[in-house]
Image: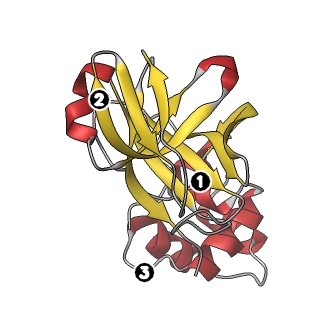
Amino acid sequence: MINRIRDIRKEKGLTLADLAEACDPPTTAQTIGRLETGMRNLSIKWMDRIAAALEIEPELLVRSETAAAPQVVAILNEHGADALRSPRDAILATELGGDMPLIVLVVEASSGEYRPGDQVWLRQLDPSDAPRAINRDVLVPRKGGRFAFGRLIDRQGSMVGILPPGAGQKQQVVDDPAWIAVAEMLVRRL
């Protein structure tokens, strides 16, 4: 696993020995060096220990700085998909690649196959690319700071038809959305 321990340690002006001593319980400089270079597996336990010693969040040890952090922009609740008042960085230690931005929908209430705590990672597309998203789960902005989330079932001209997850839902039609975001990954806690 590629990590950023060395970069962060150096930014903070620490030596291998300094970081090793700051860990709880303390470890050796040799162990820190092996973790930095990937010669030793960086487990969750080690990430927590090293992050605490560096006074940072553990996920920062593996986040890439070359890619923009995906944003949590919406929440799925019992009333449908709503916008967050202030978007925030989504936390996942991976890069999915791709040219268009990633955004994240957080599920707060069960809806169809989605459970509370799930994160749906979506890739934004230009609306002209909507045919690529037919029969896939999508997030589409609506007027008034709201969103439509569900299966893209129809596209006619500038209008798209979204079928929300769950039994008995009515199709939502959105006219001329600024973008369509297609689900790429479901993140579910174990």
Distance from Cα at disc 2 to Cα at disc 1: 33 Å
Seen at 54% across and 62% down, the residue is 166
Identify the element where label 1 is drawn: loop
Distance from Cα at disc 3 to Cα at disc 1: 24 Å
Between 124 and 9, the residue placed more toward the observer is 124
Relative height, residue 111 to residue 156 (above, below): below
Distance from Cα at disc 3 to Cα at disc 2: 51 Å
Q: Is residue 133 visible?
A: yes
Q: Is residue 26 left or right of residue 73?
A: right
Relative height, residue 144 to residue 19 (above, below): above
Between 86 and 75, the residue placed more toward the observer is 75
Relative height, residue 143 to residue 33 (above, below): above
In the rendered structure, which amino acid carries the disc numbered 3?
Arg
Circle 3 residues within 10 Å: few <14, some 14–19, many ≥20: few
Closer to viewer: mark 3 or mark 2:
2
Residue designated by label 3:
40
In the rendered structure, which amino acid carries the disc numbered 1?
Ile
Residue designated by label 2:
155
Residue designated by label 1:
91
Between 23 and 127, the residue placed more toward the observer is 127
Relative height, residue 16 to residue 83 (above, below): below
- Give the quadrant of the C terminus: bottom right
Q: Is residue 63 left or right of residue 185?
A: right
Instruction: Give how far across and how far down residue 165 sits, in percent.
Output: 51, 57
Seen at 73% across and 47% down, the residue is 79
Hey, which quadrant is residue 84 in on the image?
Answer: top right
Closer to viewer: mark 2 or mark 1:
2
In the rendered structure, which amino acid carries the disc numbered 2?
Arg
Looking at the image, tell me whether mark 3 or mark 2 is earlier in sequence order: 3
